[in-house]
Image (spheres, rainbow, N blue to C red):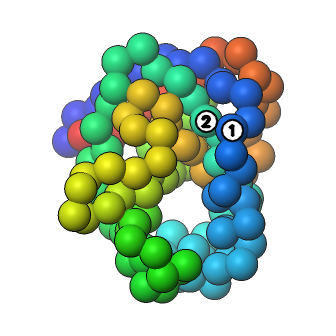
Amino acid sequence: MGSLTVTGIVAPRMSGHFKPLMERFSEVFAEATGERLIPGTLNVRVETPITIKEDFRILASKLDGGEQDLLFERCRIDGIPAYRLRRFNPSTGEGNHGDHILEISSSTWIPNSSPESRVTIEFFR
């Protein structure tokens, strides 16, 4: 397995919809990932859209019952183990911000997380 490394810029806080979802369904997230993620995501803007490579997913029926599943891809951000999360509507292929904003979550606090900070994300592909 190879890797894909990209550099991006931390975007200012957007809608903040992941934090309440992750708090409300913390057991579902823990079961899926095997760890307790810090609620919320760090939004990282990349120059070239990156299509997610799904490692696993949480079905919408286990969360809010909407039309969008939640895809996960394992990665590292500045060397810290993390996940890229992406909402995904199986009917349309759409979800959230698209593939130019990477939503990253981890069980470890990410120190370089201020808006406009430059971060490096490594995907295992």
Whole-number angstrom distance, CA of label 1 to CA of label 2: 8 Å
Within 10 Å of disc 2 (Cα), the crowding (few <14, some 14-19, many 20+) is: many
Dot 1 amino acid type = Met
- Residue 14's mark? 1
Residue 27 visible to an observer of this rendering: yes
Q: Amino acid at mark 2?
A: Asn
Residue 71 percent coordinates (x, y): 38, 60
Which residue is label 2 attached to?
43
| Residue ID at (73%, 28%) | 12
52 lies above or below 101: below
Q: Residue at x 38, y 71 (%)?
A: 67
- Residue 89 appears left or right of 97: left
Look at the picture and state if 90 lies above or below 17.
below
- Determine the secondary structure under disc 1: loop
Q: Secondary structure at mark 2?
A: strand
Q: How many marks?
A: 2
Residue 5 seen in this snapshot: no
For residue 35, what is the image quadrant?
bottom right
Q: Nearer the viewer, residue 15 or 72?
A: 15
Mark 1 and mark 2 in contact? Answer it, CB < 8 Å. yes
Lateral position of residue 15 relative to residue 88, left or right? right
